[in-house]
Image (spheres, helix red, strand yellow):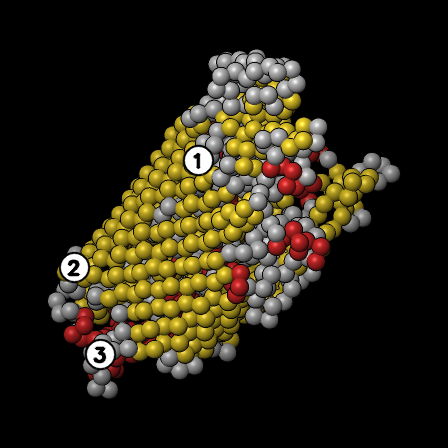
Amino acid sequence: MAMVKIATVRTLGLGDPFHTTIYIHTRGIPMCNHYQKFLFAATFLFIQLHSQIGYATPEETLQSLTQSSAAATDQNLPVLPQVTVTGTRSIPLTGSTSVDQDKLGNLPERDGNITDLLIVVPGVQFSEEYQNSLAAGEIRPAEISISGGRTYENNFLIDGMNNNNLVDPTSALPTLVDNLPGYSQAIFLDNHLVDQVIVYDHNIPARYGGFTGGVVAAETKEPSAAFGGRLYYRRTSDNWTSFHVAQEDKDVFYNSDFYTKQPGFTKQQTGFELNVPITPKSALLAAYALNYSEIPLSNLSSREELTRRSDNYFLKYVNHFDTAQTLTVSALYAPYSESFFLRRTLNSEFELDGDNQSLTVDYENIGSFGTLNLNLSIRDSEKSREAPDRLLTWLSNIDDIPTSKDWGLLFNSNSSKEGGLGDLTTQQQIFSLSADWLSNSVTFSRTRQIFNLGVAFDRIAAKLERGHPAYAYSRATAITDGTPCLEDDLACIDGEQYLGRRKTYPVGSAEEVVFQYNIYFDDQISVDRFTIRPGVRLSRDTLMENTDTAPRLAAAYLISEKLGTTLLAGWNRYYSQNLLTYKLKEALAPSFNDDRSSADEPFPEVATELDPPRSRFSRLNTPYSDEASVGIVQQLYGGDLKLDYIHRKNQDQLAKEYVTTADGAYFTLNNNGSGEYDSYRASWSKEWSHQYLEINATYEETLSSNENYENLYDEDDLLELVWYEGELLYKDEIPRENFNRPWTANLIYTNKINSRLSFTNTTRYQSHYRAIEDSRDDTDDGYAIYVDVRRPSTVSFDWNLSYDIPLSNDQTLVLDLDIFNVFNKKNQIGTEEDEYSLGRQVWLGMEYIF
């Protein structure tokens, strides 16, 4: 019998997603033959289920559906023979927010990635650099903080697969010889492939680990049982964008020769989906998504076009063997590339390439005792830089006479540079295997229990390699005595000049294999109106060799079923993932210099005996966060009002220190970092037949000793006092530098005006931004004085308009208009003076559905 997914429903009591898949058995008859019956029966049953499900067990739910089916029959509505509800309830105790397919289709869409969709989620903060008016051509996903965590302390998942960058997630600059820019996500998943994204931010069950921020779980689309698909295209450009730039910076901005200032750009998104039924029980989804940006800049006396390109090639196969067993296999190939050049440097063009491949196999068996889920995933992510391996700095003139390397004179410089940074490669391979069992509801007298037990194994292999040495030549000297250059000497020009110093970045390679083991258990116990979920997660890996025990506890009490009032509380511990950054950096010995004093003197052979690496690995405690939370959910005016307070205390956070020894000095990591987080949140939402309204507001305070693991924070810093707002404080007691807007509020309103036209408005308010910096002044007692740096509050309205044009044979043409910052408000952002977010920006799109 074929099974067709028709609905995902929500609980009303606590307002959390219920993530239940409703399958209708068609007895082998193709879905298209019963389209009208599906439409009427599914709509009626969905309304009944949506209003009745509450805390229902699977048996109660099935009874509810049976009653609904009977009611439909009484009204002479067409009803199919059998309806079965299967799936896993997302525990109402969990602090989570779901961005489902309805929201995905209605929210204004910007750069085609999943983190852009989270801008309206409570507890999620974006960097002050997000949508900076100076860099509008970038397409990579924004970095986010969840519940006060650092950007690399979140756990990103794609269909349960680990999508985290464990090599060097905080490295941001593309122009460093020993580093490649890193981001928290390995694969840049296109949001057109996403069915829903769930953000877990507090009271997170034991099933999830490897974070001290939050969990972002993306679920990809399922293939449809009916043949069909869609094609789409979207675009925007600098001509459709208003820039807000400080008056004194406009000349530099509009004549930019550096990648951080992008006055011109064109962004395009295109792709397709194709659903292919294979048998009555199985189907295949094939999809492709392209996100592409061109950024023209000045480069010396010409124009150079930088590019950003993200491709997603996606296949997903689903086979429902019967009502109980489902096999899902998905494959994703997601390359990403960026092009750059070194500023005012000839022949310096280079590429940063990311090559990502993944395979996920998921097997689900719904048995008489519960649901067993087996998951296997393999991901291979490689990041590389291809660049010239020599950087040479020449004289642009000698005694005011231009040399053969005279392009530096274009900007009144006495030197001219050419060449690049050399090649560098990092690789990360993850093999994961997990088993999860969720029991059916077990009843003992007045007590009802649902058990969740799981185990997981990960093998993580990482590599850092510089396969060829890189060189930087400097100390250009004029040749005045006629000394000839050596044959094939690239650092010498006969009769003109030679370069007297060579800095060598030597060959290096390091590999590390880490094994991680996890086991977890929780038990949701319900007695009358009281529900409690105790749990624990045990984790161990071979990198830090720690065994970490993370207790989890969440509880709910239904005060009044009539009024719909529920109290929530929880206490939980979360352990972060262990990064491989400093273990791999041991591969790179420090650079060294060789000098010469004449054009005919050769540089010595590259040394084989090298100094010890400047970065060294040390075994540390696993960073963790202790969380306490309380909340209330109240049914109000037909919607759910949620109020939450969340407190976190972060311990053993990673920081960097400089260690001096008898034979040299080096950098390493320590556990000196710490911080605290407090958040008060309120949200209310309601859905009508053609309208949806959601309002949420968050107040947050985040204290942190250091912004990330690359900030120096040693033993002396632990004891150092600073003067801030009239009192002496330790450094970990002052507010965080970024991701720290105290107030954020969002309003989302969607109106399906008629059968063809829909409109969505999102309004986002952010209160003033407060950063803390050293004033460089001291008190009379010698304490450093820290002062506030404030930026004003911001407000932005974003709109989406969508218009459907029905065509023949069940085909539709959809026209989309997205407008960001509709009223072109000049919102000041950033950690620097006179930085602003983008002004009004228009995206136009078209979609053909068949």
Give the spatial CA distance, label 1 vs label 3: 57 Å
Q: Mark 2 points at which residue?
A: 278
- Disc 1 marks a residue whose amino acid type is Glu
Decide which of 824, 659 is in the foreground and name it.
824
The image shows residue 474, relative to residue 22, as above or below, that is above
Residue depicted at x 50% and y 52%: 295
Quadrant of the rendered image containing residue 371 = bottom left
Q: Which residue is drawn at 23% across and 54% down?
A: 317
Quick check: 400 left or right of 46? Answer: right
Residue 537 position within the rendered picture, expressed as x and y whole percent measured from the top left:
42, 43
Residue type, mark 2 in image: Ile
Residue for badge 1: 386
Residue 36, numbered circle: 3
The quarter of the picture where the C terminus appears is bottom left
Residue located 52% across and 51% down the image: 296
Pair 1/2: label in front? 1
Q: Is residue 582 visible?
A: no
Helix, strand or loop at mark 3: helix
Type of amino acid at the residue the image marks with label 3: Gln
Q: Quadrant of residue 838?
A: bottom right
- Disc on the earlier residue, 2 or 3: 3
Is residue 11 or residue 498 the one in the foreground? 498
Q: In this view, does 376 lie above or below 810?
A: above
User: In the figure, residue 547 lies in which quadrant?
Assistant: top left
Q: How far apart are marks 1 and 2 (CA)?
A: 43 Å
Q: Which residue lies furthest to the bottom in this view?
A: 75
> Which residue is painted at 59% across and 21% down in the image?
495
- Secondary structure of the residue carrying tag 2 is strand
Which percent across, then down, holds residue 591?
55, 23
